[in-house]
Structure formats: C-alpha cells, structure tokens
Image: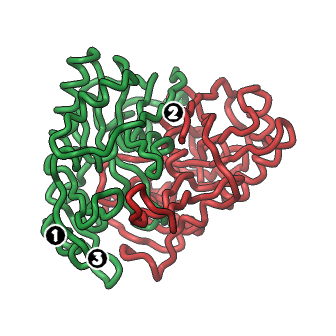
Chain colours: A red, B green
Amino acid sequence: MASEIRVIPVGGFPEIEAGVDIGAMIADTGAVQTGDVVVIAQKIVSKAEGRMVPATTREDARAAARREAKRVVRETENHLIVETHHGFVCANAGVDMSNVPDGTVALLPKDSDRSAERIRATLEERIGAPIAVIVSDTFGRAWRIGHSNVAIGSSGIRALRTYEGQSDPAGHELVVTQIAQIDELAAAAELVMDKLDRIPVAVVRGYMFTGDGTAQELVRPPEMDLFR
Amino acid sequence: MASEIRVIPVGGFPEIEAGVDIGAMIADTGAVQTGDVVVIAQKIVSKAEGRMVPATTREDARAAARREAKRVVRETENHLIVETHHGFVCANAGVDMSNVPDGTVALLPKDSDRSAERIRATLEERIGAPIAVIVSDTFGRAWRIGHSNVAIGSSGIRALRTYEGQSDPAGHELVVTQIAQIDELAAAAELVMDKLDRIPVAVVRGYMFTGDGTAQELVRPPEMDLFR
C-alpha cells in the first residue's frame, strides 16, 4: 500500500557562482533527511560547474545550442530541436538565457548523472544514506503543449519502476510495465519549484525507493525510437 | 513563495461497475477537502462509463485501438501509435487489457474533459468549491523510455501555468513560459497510485490553483506539431 508523500520546496540560496559545492549548500539548509529524494534544477548545477558561455543575442544562443548538439532533430525558424551529447532530445540543447548573468547562457551539465552522483555522495556523507538525487530540467514534449520537468541526471534510485511479470488482481499481466519514476519525481518537484522565487530545489519525502540508476537509462536507443 | 504539497493515496474502492457515480464514490471516502486537486486513473472512469468492449486476443485489442484512432502515427509489428479522437498521441489508443474483466478491454472515456467536469461538479456540490479534477493515464513518450502519467481530462484548473511576460530576478524574460501543470500533477499523483493495490485516486493538497481549462488545450495543433 502506497503511503502519502510530501513535496517540500527548498529555497533561500544565494546566487550560485562557479565552484560552489551544491551538495554542501543543500545539506547546510537542514531541509534534507535520510530517505529523501532531492530534486535539483539543472540551472544551479550548471552554474556551480561553470557551464556558462558568453552569448548576447538569440543567434549566439542558437550557435551555442548547435555546439551542444549531437544531431539536429527538427529545425524551423523558431525552433531548434536537437539530440544533446547525452542523448536527450530537447529544444535548444537545453541552452537557457533566463536566470543567468547578462551576456551569458547556461549549458546543461556535461555529465548530469555524474553531477547527481557527486551531490548524492556529499548529501549521504553529511546526512546519511539512502538519499536519492535527481537533476531536472523542463523539456517540451512531442504532441503535447507545455513543458514538463524531467530527470536529466539521477543517482541512488532506479530510473524505472517496473510492473513486469506482475499481475493485476484479476490475474492479467500488466501491460504498462515501466514507469519512468525519476521523471515523475522531477515533475512533482517542479510543482513547488518557482523559477521566479529562486526555489531551485525540492525534497520528496515518504517515497519508497531502492536500487540505483541513471537518467541516461531513459534515453531511447535509436533502434527503439520511432520518432527520430 | 511556493509551499509544501502533499500527495495522498485514496484506495479501498470496490471493483467499479458501469453506472457507478465516481464523484459520489470519491466524496464518500471523506478523503477530499476544498482546495484539493483530485487525480483519477482513467481506468475507473472508463469502467464507470461502460467503456468496455469485448476482446480476448492481442489482435482484438489492436482492432479496438484502430477503431478509437483518428490517425495512425506509427505502426510496427509490436507498436501501434495513434492519434485518438481526442487528439492524444499514444500507444494502442489507450486501449488497455489490464485490470479489466476477462474477455474485455477498456477504451478511454469518450470525452475525458467532460468526465472530469462531471466528477468535479459532484465533488464541489458535496464538499465545496474549489476542487480541481484530473483524469489521468500513463502514456509512453517519444525519445524517452518508460511511461509517465499525464492528464487526459481536466476541470477546475488552468492546464498551463505561465511565466509569460514575467522576468527572472535579473530582469531577463523567462524563456520557458508554459508549464503543463495538469500533467505534472498527474505525474505526482501516479507516485502514490499503485496499480496492483487498487489505488486509482490521489489527492494533491496544498497546491495553489486558479482558473479553468481542459486537457484538450494540451493537444498540439497539427500546424504546431513538428513530429506528426
């Protein structure tokens, strides 16, 4: 029987400079407990990792996005959808001009699973294991309007929750077998992460999790991808 | 400043028969308060609305899916991705063989926004306004492995939360302007909705919402859709 979960905003951080230890900074808030899932907006991770590059115009930003792309998936005058070097398909390779210092744009973390792993190591050392860490970003979706928060990095939790081989109460094998739980946790966290109020972190408390995994595991390999 | 939200599982329902008043049944649990967002798995709505059709084999299910489709988006031996008559792009038109009586499959509600509206009317009459209602289903995604819960029907809440025209603390206009909040609420709810334990409903408490809207608003019109 599933039990109630809480989604708790964690704010009050200063402007993040390159070199900041995000894990230590979050531990210092006192907001995290053993057993929590900590969801962190990509932007502060990118800033702490110094992933800012100069760009003043939309054209500069698009050029930066091209450099971050492994493959252009769709391009129109107003849209550039690419596959990033991580394998994520998103607009502008996740390059973002908002909430950044003037004249710069923020790139995605170079290895966002590794970022999550490092932050988790610090949190578990300071607070105690297990703690799961998800680095999130808001992506657009094919066919549906609006953005939704998804996991681009993850550590200390299985990426997928699986019903495989399990049966429903009537004895039918469940057809929907794999839930992208780290994406759903990222989405839940976004509900309390107000971009305008500098709340770049949320804690999900009471969610039972086991195992380990990466956001990379959610990248659909080309041979399984009907929408390349 | 965003505040904490709670996501509360609501279970203990009997097997749902055609004709059941889902709104009254949920009100009877006593689990819902004014100001809640109530997320309901599509399956029980479909059952209550008598949206079951005979099907015993995978081929029968695929035939039912074709009848529910406005357009086939992709088809392979193992996958049938269609646009439903609502405009949703999903596998097998949402037709589902799990958690249903033997020899039948469940179709999506005919008008899932209308379903949400009716349930909301009952809940608000019984408990008090405002209450938002979301009917959800787990959909696969392009490019990403695993399913995620999304809104296929909604009433009493804006579908999108918009940052349009607002600026970040540094004065830059925010580029990510529209969050599909009803999808994120559906995803948050799924984290406590265990298919195996008959928890088809979850309450999200403490989430501030205003306005009205439908899940239909999230359907990307063909001229804006780069992935048809």
Q: Earlier in the sequence, mark 3 or mark 1?
A: 3
Identify the residue shown where x is 60% and y is 60%.
A215
Relative to B71, residue A191 above or below: above
Indicate the quadrant containing the C terminus of chain B: top left, top right, bottom left or bottom right: bottom left
Observer-nearest residue: A73 or B88?
B88
10 Å neighbourhood of mark 1: few (<14), some, or many (≥20)?
A: some
Please give the name of the residue rendered at 30% of the width and 24% of the height, measured from the top-left corner: B27
Q: Are marks 3 and 1 on the same chain?
A: yes
Q: Quadrant of residue A26?
A: top right
Which kind of residue does numbered mark 2 sit on? Lys
Amino acid, disc 1: Arg
Q: Disc 3 to disc 1, how far (Cα)?
A: 20 Å
* Residue at mark 3: chain: B
Residue in front for this viewpoint, B152 or A123: B152
Question: Comparing marks 2 and 3, which lies closer to the viewer?
Answer: 3
Q: Nearer the viewer, mark 1 or mark 2?
A: 1
- Residue A224: percent from the left, percent from the top? 45, 78
Answer yes or no: is residue B142 visible: yes
Label 2: chain?
A
Q: Residues within 10 Å of mark 3 (few under 14, many from 20)?
A: few
Instruction: Provide the residue designation for mark 3.
Output: B58
The one of A22 and B25 positioned closer to us in this rendering: B25
> Which element is circle 1 on?
strand
What residue is pinned by disc 2? A195
Residue A126 placement, left or right of A199: right
Residue B82 % position (x, y): 23, 68
Hey, what amino acid is under mark 3? Arg
Query: Disc 2 on helix, strand or loop?
Result: helix
Give the residue displayed 82% in from the left and 36% down from the top: A127
> Of the numbered discs in the image, which one, if any, rests on residue B71?
1
